[in-house]
Structures are given as structure tokens and as C-alpha cells.
Amino acid sequence: MKLNPSFSLRAVVMAAGVLLSAGAHAALFEDSDARRAILDLRERVERQGEEIQNFQRSLLEQQNQFEALRTETARLRGEKEELTQELRRAKEQSQGVDERLKKFEPSTVKVDGVEFVAEPSETKAYEEALGLFRKGDFVAATTAFNDFIKRYPKSGYGVPSLFWLGNAQYANRGYTNAIANFNTLLSKAPNHLRAADALLSVANCQLELKDIKAARKTLADVVKTYPHTEAAAAATERLAKLK
């Protein structure tokens, strides 16, 4: 069978057209999918970009909050330190006030085994007078103890002051005045720690005044009234020498 040349050409052209049409359709389909994929990718990138920006903003806000918190913590720490310093200063001032007040407040003291309450001025005056006696300045000590007894007639330091006054007068050879002050001590506090020594000192003053009879009687009184004391032992020895 012999084909018509024109028919064959048309068939080839048509077949080619079909093939070209199919290829074009396939190319168009592929371009559309690629474009859609690109758009989807772009959308994901944009969404991720927005998420990154949101994360960055959130991070920045947290950083700002952290900075604000650190600033507030520093401020509170500073306030705490300032309050601590103020409390320390207030405590030091309070202690200073208390110490100054104590200088003017009465306090309990103990002298020769006797406790009593004394004003700071009393204690100071007594210690100053006793300091003069210990230095051997018996004239100044006599004046100081006389002044103390006149200034503080009811002081708990009164009896010790009489004892040291009598001893200062004895050292200055003021035997008569010394006897008077020792006897005053004995009349006020016959059971005082210094009483036996005071009575022995009376006997010593009487011996210095050459009143042997009175001295012998006083020494006997020391032994009788205050036995088992060092004063009684000394009185016994002196009595033996007077016989």
C-alpha cells in the first residue's frame, strides 16, 4: 500500500504538535510546583524571621528586666548598708550616752568588806584623798579627808575616811586629833573591819603622848574586844613590854 505524501507530512506535524503540547504542559506543571514550593519556603522563612524577631524582642525584654532587677538589687543593697551604718552609729552614740550617764549615776561599791551606794563624786573624792595618803603626803591627805567628811557626812566612805584621817594625823604627830577620829570610828562602827586597828592606833597615840596608863588600858581592851586578830596579837606584845 502506497501512502499519500501529504498525509504523511500532516501526520508527522500533528504528532510533533501533540508531543510539543505535552512537553509544554509538563513544563508548565513543573514551573507551577517550583513556584509554589518557593512561595511556601518564603512563607516559612518569613514566619521564622518573625519568630526570630519575637524571640529577640523577648530576649531584649528579659535582659532589660534583668538589668532593672540588678539595679534594684544594688539599690536595696546600698540602702541596707546605709541602714546598717546608721544602726551602728546609733548604737555607738547610745553606748556613749550610757557611759556618760554612768559617770553621773550612783553605783554600788565595796570598801573594807562593806557594800554601799555612792555618787561618782564621792568615789572620786575619796580615791583622791587616799591617793595622797599612799604617796606619803600626809598633810594634804589630812586636809582632803577632813573636807570629804564635811562634804559627805552620810557617805559609806565615812568610816574608812576616819581611819585614814587618823593615820595621816598620827603620821603628822597630831596625836590628839588622831585619837578623836579613831574614837569616832569606833563609836560609829565598832564591828568594822578597821575597828581593831583603830583601837590599837589609839593606844599608839597614847604611848606617843606618854600616857602609859591610858595606853595600857587601851591595849587590854584591844585584846579583850578583838581577840584572834593581828591587832590583838600586837597589843599583847606591847603590854608585855610595858610591864
Image (spheres, grey):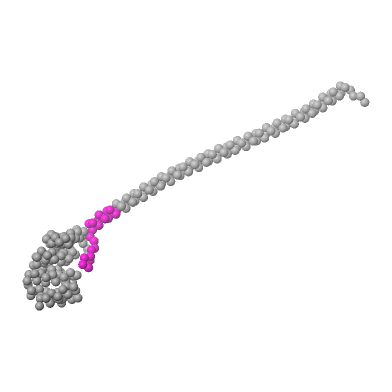
Q: Is 195 displayed left or right of 90 in the figure?
A: left
Q: Is residue 129 above or below residue 233?
A: above
Which residue is painted at 26% across and 55% down in the image?
A: 99
Q: Nearer the viewer, residue 209 or 17?
A: 209
Q: Which residues are magenta?
A: 94-115
Which residue is painted at 40% across and 47% down in the image?
A: 77
| Residue farthest right in this picture | 1
Q: Nearer the viewer, residue 132 or 46?
A: 132
Q: Is residue 188 above or below residue 12?
A: below
Q: Is 77 displayed left or right of 107 in the figure?
A: right
Q: Is residue 238 above or below residue 69?
A: below
Q: Is 86 displayed left or right of 136 in the figure?
A: right
| Residue farthest front in this picture | 241
Q: Is residue 6 above or below residue 75?
A: above
Q: Position of residue 174 (x, y in %)?
A: 9, 65
Q: Position of residue 194 (x, y in %)?
A: 17, 69
Q: Position of residue 143 (x, y in %)?
A: 12, 60
Which residue is painted at 79% across and 26% down in the image?
A: 17
Q: Position of residue 83 (x, y in %)?
A: 36, 49
| Residue 150 seen from this side | no
Picture quarter with the C terminus: bottom left
| Residue 205 seen from this side | yes
Q: Is-magenta flag for residue 101?
A: yes
| Residue farthest left in this picture | 210
Picture quarter with the N terminus: top right
Q: Nearer the viewer, residue 66 or 231?
A: 231
Which residue is painted at 83% across and 25% down in the image?
A: 12
Q: Is-magenta flag for residue 24?
A: no
Q: How many marks?
A: 0
Residue 42 placement: quadrant: top right
